[in-house]
Image (cartoon, rainbow, N blue to C red):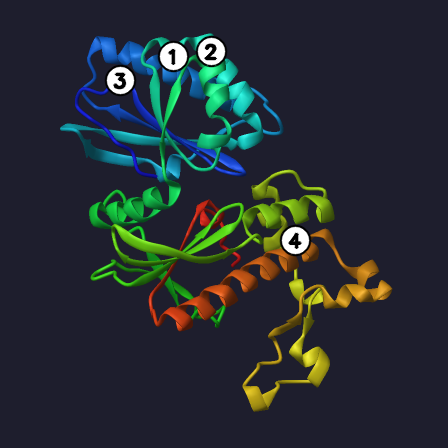
């Protein structure tokens, strides 16, 4: 997310990314705050504490401590960037908390991006008297990615790739830097998916997208398993075996499809086994969650590959909140 800070901007400094599934709130806490700034920041922190401690639509908000950027320099100040997330369904309770804490008295304009910056613009204006300075989410995405890569993540590289990705036993996560990053294909996985061809920081185009994204994964898992949160769905998926749900190449050919170099372990038909009552009766919720995850990610990967070939781009980056905690991918 791109945030525009100016030295004369009212304190506290924070912004919102209001997506289709989640709201991400980010705020900056300087190490050397004045007494007045501590009081002003306290209003925002009390709202964040309220969100984390109160049960909202489903679950309380989460503070992503692992995402904190420490010793960050912003407008000549050094401090920490904090991240809070909660469900977009809880925007109204969030605004009620803002109204109760009277944070709108501090200033009248807040930077915001994402589709919700347009959808909820009138709610912000009517409920708390705050105007949203709307920033295009794809502009924020490309600039934010390059910013994070240039400054690092608490001394570490933010981007990584998987070495020996197809061999579970030998697969290793390796850091990498985006040296000479252009052109690149940027695949943003949120509730849905957007695929961008990026030729420079200010020159990019949206090639295509798919409605089958993180929101699809969670929605289907809620229907199929009864889970309620993304974390629950991933926990189930990590314990399941999608091969009990999906029909593989070997289930059709008895082994590999050698003519086209298709391994027997390749998914030929997602949820293909579910045509059989016997298979349905023996399938667990964990298996269904895993198969759902594989279905969504296989689709995203296939689309990304086709776009990369069509655009003649050999560097593909996957980003988005969907990837924040998916070790079983």
Q: Are marks 3 and 1 in contact (CB under 8 Å)?
A: no
| For discs 3 and 1, the disc positioned in front in the rendered view | 1
Q: Are marks 2 and 4 in contact (CB under 8 Å)?
A: no
The residue beneath circle 3 is 11
Real-space CA distance between mark 1 and mark 4, rounded to the nearest whole angstrom: 42 Å
Say which quadrant the N terminus sits in: top left
Percent across and percent down for residue 182 are: 25, 61
Work out whether 227 lies above or below 255. above
Q: Does any portion of residue 235 appear in the rendered image?
A: no
Percent across and percent down for residue 3 are: 29, 33
The residue beneath circle 1 is 104
| For discs 2 and 4, the disc positioned in front in the rendered view | 2
Real-space CA distance between mark 2 and mark 4, rounded to the nearest whole angstrom: 39 Å
Real-space CA distance between mark 4 and mark 3, rounded to the nearest whole angstrom: 44 Å
- Crowdedness near tag 1: few (<14), some (14–19) or many (≥20) residues, C-alpha within 10 Å: some
- Crowdedness near tag 4: few (<14), some (14–19) or many (≥20) residues, C-alpha within 10 Å: many
The residue beneath circle 4 is 289
The residue beneath circle 2 is 99
Q: Specify which label sits upstream in the sequence, 1 or 2.
A: 2
Percent across and percent down for residue 98 are: 45, 15
Work out whether 184 lies above or below 133. below
Q: Are marks 1 and 2 in contact (CB under 8 Å)?
A: yes
Q: Are marks 1 and 4 in contact (CB under 8 Å)?
A: no
Real-space CA distance between mark 1 and mark 2, rounded to the nearest whole angstrom: 7 Å
């Amino acid at each position: 997310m791109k945030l525009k800070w100016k030295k004369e901007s009212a304190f506290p400094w924070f912004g919102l990314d209001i997506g289709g599934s989640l709201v991400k709130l980010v705020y900056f806490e300087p190490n050397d705050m004045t007494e007045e700034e501590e009081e002003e920041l306290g209003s925002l922190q009390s709202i964040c504490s309220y969100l984390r401690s109160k049960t909202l639509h489903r679950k309380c908000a989460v503070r992503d401590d692992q995402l904190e950027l420490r010793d960050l320099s912003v407008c000549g100040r050094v401090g920490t960037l904090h991240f809070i997330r909660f469900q977009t369904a809880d925007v109204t309770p969030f605004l009620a908390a803002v109204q109760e804490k009277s944070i709108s008295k501090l200033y009248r304009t807040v930077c915001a991006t994402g589709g919700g910056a347009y959808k909820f613009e009138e709610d912000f204006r009517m409920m708390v008297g705050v105007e949203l300075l709307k920033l295009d989410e794809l502009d924020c995405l490309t600039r934010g990615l390059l910013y994070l890569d240039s400054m690092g993540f608490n001394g570490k590289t933010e981007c990584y790739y998987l070495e020996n990705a197809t061999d579970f036993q030998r697969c290793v996560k390796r850091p990498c830097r985006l040296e000479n990053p252009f052109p690149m294909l940027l695949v943003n996985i949120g509730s849905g998916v957007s695929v961008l061809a990026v030729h420079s920081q200010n020159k990019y185009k949206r090639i295509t997208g798919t409605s089958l994204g993180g929101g699809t994964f969670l929605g289907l898992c809620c229907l199929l398993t009864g889970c309620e949160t993304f974390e629950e769905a991933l926990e189930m998926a990590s314990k399941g075996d999608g091969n009990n749900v999906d029909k593989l190449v070997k289930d059709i050919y008895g082994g590999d499809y050698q003519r086209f170099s298709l391994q027997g372990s390749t998914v030929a038909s997602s949820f293909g086994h579910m045509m059989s009552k016997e298979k349905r009766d023996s399938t667990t919720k964990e298996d269904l969650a895993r198969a759902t995850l594989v279905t969504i990610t296989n689709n995203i990967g296939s689309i990304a590959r086709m776009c990369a070939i069509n655009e003649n781009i050999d560097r593909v980056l996957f980003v988005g909140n969907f990837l924040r905690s998916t070790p079983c991918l």
